[in-house]
Image (cartoon, grey):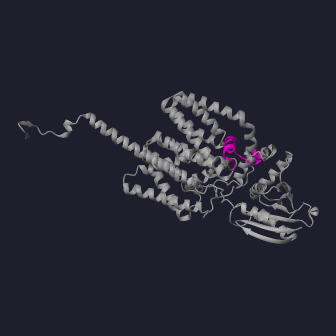
Amino acid sequence: MFDQGSIRIPAVSRTKIVPKAFKKIDTMREGILKNKETSLLFLGIIVLGFGLRLFQLDKRDFWFDEVITHRHISTAYSAENRNFINNFLEKNPPFYFALLRQWSRIFGKSEFSLRFLSSLLGILSIALLYKVSGLLFSRSVSLLAAGFLSLSPFQIWYSQEARAFSLSAALSLLNTYLILRAIKSDDNKYWLWYSLSLSFLFLTTYFSFFLLVPQAVLVIYNRKFILKWLISFLGSGLLFFIFLYPTFMRQFATLQHANWLPASGGPGFILASLNNFVIGYNAGPAVFQAALFLILGVGFFACFNMAAKQLIILFFFFAAPVILALIFSKIFFPVYLDRNMIIFCPFLYILLSKGISSIKYRWLKSLVILGFLVCIALSLVNYYNDILPARRPNAIIFLKKPIRPLVNLFLQNKEDGDIVGFSNYGFMYTFLHYLRQETEEYRGITKYYFYISPGDKFFESQIINKRSFGFKSEFEPVNIEKGCFGSLVDKRIWLFSASWKRRGGLEPYAKKVKAWFDKNYFKIREWYTDGVWIAVYRI
């Protein structure tokens, strides 16, 4: 009690005077500040991911797969040529190519323009993963998952490539978000959008069929939605079979002869894939081992610190499809490649984010995050500097060769009537792509693909298919042990002997061709650069 003039005022605490409404205002203010902080962090993740995907976007020339993409969408090639590519060289559905064709009409067909679409889709995947994570876990988990995808060298690799992988990942996340929202809200509009997104996913990647297994488990867990899911799925499946069944069967038959795909292995094979999904292909052996330790430790910790329903969802959306792809590869024929699993690995990022978020000790949590950041940063430095320290048998990836300098070398040193020959079809397609761009004399240059049987069985089988379809290509395939060079007397042949790898020795079939030319013809001059041997012979 104290005096204030002649009035005695009781000394009461502030908490008894301040109305409860003020407490609510304080709570709302804290919530607004927290939302603002979250929004700024998310915006930072988006900006960082966008910058990493734009950095050096057009530094590298197209490689074989991207040249196939370019041919798909270009009117410079005949419909017959594009049909051959679609049936025998391309193994993916057509939606990405249809989308890219419209994109290229506005932005052009340069390396930057075609890859920029993939970069934008990669950014969209970050936002979609944040939304998917938010339906299952807290904001902190959502931000960490978005951060993993934003920084992942694996995701950045395919966000800088003119192929369908970024679109596949974005559509997979959109489809997952819609089915989770449909189950949570029981709103028919979400089921309609889910069915539509599933149709586009089917038209983008055949591996989307593996996604149906976790979705079926999710719906069975919520039984009252089984009928709606079946109607949505059957509607999408019907569209697929109407538009794609003939193409699917031809591509499926061709894929059975793709001897370049790796046979799936044991635990080491799976562990290598886990590492690739998080830190990419460019990590050195020490970083590889350190990242694997972090992934397994955090992953197991996450499994013991989440509700059963959440664990089931993450297991079936990530592990089950990957395991099914491995089983299919074991029983039938190889189809497993890490890049084809890109539609499932975002769920691994959610799992790791949940594990990190569940760590109680702040110092330990910070240490784990720092460990991941160091591993990712070291891998990214190697990626941007074109360093691939270790072989990745379950990836089948190659550093992109600088093709334009080789085309310029040929154009600066060629003579009238010179002939161009190749012994590696991957290099051949990329070289001819840039040769067509650099000279108006392209059609006047004679081009051969040389081989000695048995050579590259996959491509030789495609040559046979090509001939059976009456396809007239821009190059002539020649078995040099049977071919007659009598009409080429006094001509010069430029033989480009290349490997798929940017650096390293030739494949056995390319070595045979080069050795045959070395033995039978006079070599005028020779160069070597980035896994390419260039020799000029006089016939």
Side of 330 relative to 216 (left or right): right
Q: Nearer the viewer, residue 209 or 264?
A: 209
Outermost residue, left side: 6
Q: Position of residue 54 (x, y in %)?
A: 58, 53
Report the span colored magenta. Answer: 85-109
Q: Residue at x 87, y 63 (%)?
A: 416
Is most of the magenta stretch helix, strand or loop? helix
In the picture shown, does residue 89 fall above or below 455? above
Q: Nearer the viewer, residue 340 or 264?
A: 340
Picture quadrant of residue 270? bottom right
Q: Position of residue 262 (x, y in %)?
A: 67, 55
Q: Is 490 included in the stretch rendered in magenta?
A: no
- Quadrant the N terminus occupies: top left
Q: Residue at x 48, y 58 (%)?
A: 373
Q: Position of residue 301 (x, y in %)?
A: 44, 51
- Quadrant the C terminus occupies: bottom right
Q: Is 105 included in the stretch rendered in magenta?
A: yes
Outermost residue, front side: 5
Q: Residue at x 80, y 67 (%)?
A: 413
Res 322 visible: no
Q: Nearer the viewer, residue 89 or 39?
A: 39
Q: Position of residue 151 (x, y in %)?
A: 52, 53
